[in-house]
């Protein structure tokens, strides 16, 4: 799922069915060649292992971290063909009990993490072990992060010149005109062509199924007989694919903010559901700002806050802040706040300051950062390739237009922005797969832990319910009435207690459990905490 995106009422909309799959769709289940290829690659990786050493300078990681690479086939049907190298990072288990300095904690193996995307890197994950909420896990596990295929240094994928990636200032997409739609269609077609031109025949191999196969090769390279895996957002989807493909290779798995794995929802319908859910989060944010009108002065009701936001958007359309922050950048900044409550004070403060004549906070938060263009373009390319390759998409614009015009009547905030992100999939030049039917029967898979925020918009709660239904013997822990995306290791001791009990002792509640909501953010400026685990760790 893309990383930004948006009420339960909108879920009742009757959305048009998907167009038929292209004639060149791949088989619905992985073939014997891929099964054999994965086994061959895993066996080789176990023998080769990973030669961990100093991390590349460009990764900006501390000396305490160690890095290495693991080779995987580009095409698992041809394990002796072209190989690509995935970058891996690791911090060894500390063995230090944070509550008893005299006790040495026994090592339990490697805990591998994926942060989602598609297109996100987990290379910084091992640094999170310095945070108080993670020290018990860091004592027992080697914390292992990696960059999935296409990401960062792992056979990097690109679809356009990064220098052209940030287009700012830009208009908001809330109510696009017909001429603007035609412009975005042309851009989507050009982007799809760019992916094909730059990646060539390799483009078709950036898929969730291959991400799951890569994970098994990484498990073997780490010397682990069974995988202990923790994932957030999109990572839960290919983690569920792994659980379906390799159930006997699973030790423990945590699915935090689970994607709906129903094959009929991958990915077009999941994105429609995401756009609908973000409208609810946008309302939550405005209600919180209104509650703190004495701090921000943006209005004492959600409706008044919306008027303040629209006034700022109109002003930015007439004169972009700093020449680079227009209505589109304003929308993007507040869309990202729909993911994480801890951004709410920063966005509210910036909007308030802008309307009072000080544009600097808004420019800093919403403006494009050219130094990040290459990383952002790479993440976008991988996101697009994986989602477009994974499943059939409507190939006629009229289907997209009809579904999203209908949805935007009740959920205007995020709907069209989500369309433009995914529209290259309508014109995708590579073959599409049929999604694997994620499903395990009783006793086939060790008990797994699913975490979900009840008002999460990026991965709406119905996805966690569906994941829970499909993975037999799984347990669902719900954080009530909150919507932060990714709830493990946060400020809720109830959630963290369930994670620690499971990963450290194998203990789980029966079927389902609920945790009280996390505290609402304080209405005061604070360091921007929505960063990589490394940046978070460095800030402590």
Image (cartoon, rainbow, N blue to C red):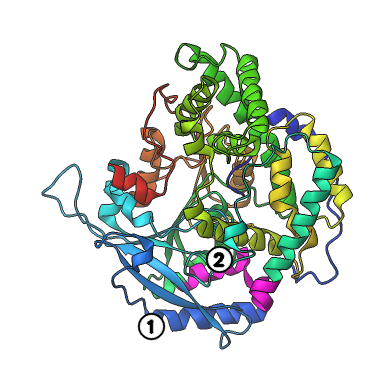
Left or right, 104 with respect to 525, comes to left
Query: Badge 2 is on which residue?
Result: 212
Please check the rendered image and state whether residue 210 is part of the magenta-colored stretch, yes or no: yes
Left or right, 512 with respect to 101, comes to right
Q: Secondary structure at mark 2?
A: helix
Q: Is residue 435 visible?
A: no
Can you tell which quarter of the image residue 418 is in? Answer: top right
Q: Secondary structure at mark 1?
A: helix
Locate the C terminus and report the quarter of the image it occupies.
top left
Residue 410 percent location from the top left of the image: 76, 29
Q: Residue at x 13, y 47 (%)?
A: 101
Residue sticking out furthest to the bottom: 80
Q: Image height check: is 166 above or below 484?
A: below
Q: Residue at x 29, y 47 (%)?
A: 538
The residues tagged by marks 1 and 2 sit, at their Cα atoms, a distance apart of: 20 Å
Cβ atoms under marks 1 and 2 closer than 8 Å: no
Residue 415 percent location from the top left of the image: 72, 39
Please check the rendered image and state whether residue 22 is part of the magenta-colored stretch, yes or no: no
The stretch in magenta equals: 197-217
Q: How many numbered marks appear?
A: 2
Q: Nearer the viewer, residue 285 or 199?
A: 199
Magenta-drawn stretch, dominant element (helix, strand or loop): helix
Residue 200 percent location from the top left of the image: 67, 76
Q: Mark 1 or 2 closer to N-term?
A: 1
Q: Is residue 91 visible?
A: yes
Can you tell which quarter of the image residue 34 is in? Answer: bottom right
Can you tell which quarter of the image residue 98 is in? Answer: top left
Query: Badge 1 is on which residue?
Result: 48
Q: Nearer the viewer, residue 213 or 83?
A: 83
């Amino acid at each position: 799922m893309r990383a930004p995106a948006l009420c339960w009422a909108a879920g009742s909309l009757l959305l048009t069915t998907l167009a038929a799959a292209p004639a060149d769709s791949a088989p619905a289940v992985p073939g014997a060649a891929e099964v054999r290829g994965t086994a061959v690659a895993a066996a080789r990786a176990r023998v080769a292992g990973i030669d961990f050493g100093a991390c590349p300078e460009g990764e900006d990681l501390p000396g305490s971290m160690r890095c290495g690479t693991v080779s995987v086939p580009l095409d698992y049907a041809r394990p002796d063909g072209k190989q690509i190298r995935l970058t891996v990072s690791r911090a060894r288990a500390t063995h230090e009990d944070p509550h008893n300095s005299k006790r040495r904690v026994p090592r339990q193996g490697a805990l591998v993490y994926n942060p989602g995307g598609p297109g996100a890197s987990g290379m910084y994950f091992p640094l999170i072990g310095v945070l108080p909420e993670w020290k018990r896990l860091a004592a027992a596990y080697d914390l292992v992060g990696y960059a999935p295929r296409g990401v960062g240094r792992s056979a990097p994928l690109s679809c356009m010149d990064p220098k052209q990636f940030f287009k700012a200032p830009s208009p908001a997409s809330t109510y696009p005109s017909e001429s603007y739609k035609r412009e975005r269609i042309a851009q989507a077609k050009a982007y799809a062509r760019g992916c094909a031109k730059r990646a060539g025949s390799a483009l078709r191999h950036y898929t969730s199924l291959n991400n799951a196969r890569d994970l098994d090769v990484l498990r073997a390279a780490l010397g682990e007989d069974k995988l202990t895996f923790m994932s957030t957002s999109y990572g839960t989807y290919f983690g569920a694919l792994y659980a379906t493909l390799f159930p006997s290779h699973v030790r423990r798995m945590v699915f935090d903010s689970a994607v709906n794995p129903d094959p009929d929802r991958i990915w077009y319908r999941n994105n429609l559901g995401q756009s609908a859910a973000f409208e609810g989060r946008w309302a939550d944010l405005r209600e919180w700002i209104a509650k703190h009108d004495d701090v921000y002065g943006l209005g004492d009701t959600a409706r008044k806050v919306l008027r303040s936001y629209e006034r700022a958007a109109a002003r930015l359309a007439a004169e972009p802040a700093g020449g680079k922050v227009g209505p589109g950048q304003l929308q993007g900044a507040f869309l990202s706040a729909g993911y994480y409550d801890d951004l709410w004070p920063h966005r509210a403060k910036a909007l308030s300051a802008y309307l009072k004549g000080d544009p600097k906070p808004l420019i800093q938060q919403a403006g494009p950062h050219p130094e990040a263009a290459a990383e952002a373009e790479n993440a976008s390319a991988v996101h697009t390739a994986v989602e477009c390759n994974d499943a059939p998409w409507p190939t006629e614009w009229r289907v997209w237009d009809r579904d999203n015009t209908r949805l935007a009547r009740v959920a205007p905030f995020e709907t069209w922005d989500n369309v433009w992100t995914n529209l290259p999939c309508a014109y995708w030049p590579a073959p599409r797969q049929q999604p694997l039917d994620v499903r395990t029967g009783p006793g086939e898979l060790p008990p797994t832990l699913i975490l979900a925020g009840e008002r999460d918009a990026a991965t709406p709660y119905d996805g966690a319910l569906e994941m829970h239904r499909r993975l037999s013997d799984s347990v669902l822990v719900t954080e009530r009435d909150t919507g932060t995306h990714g709830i493990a290791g946060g400020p809720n001791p109830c959630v963290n207690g369930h994670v620690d009990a499971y990963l450290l002792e194998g203990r789980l509640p029966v079927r389902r459990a609920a945790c009280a909501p996390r505290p609402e953010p304080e209405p005061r400026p604070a360091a921007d905490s929505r960063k990589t685990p490394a940046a978070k760790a460095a800030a402590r």
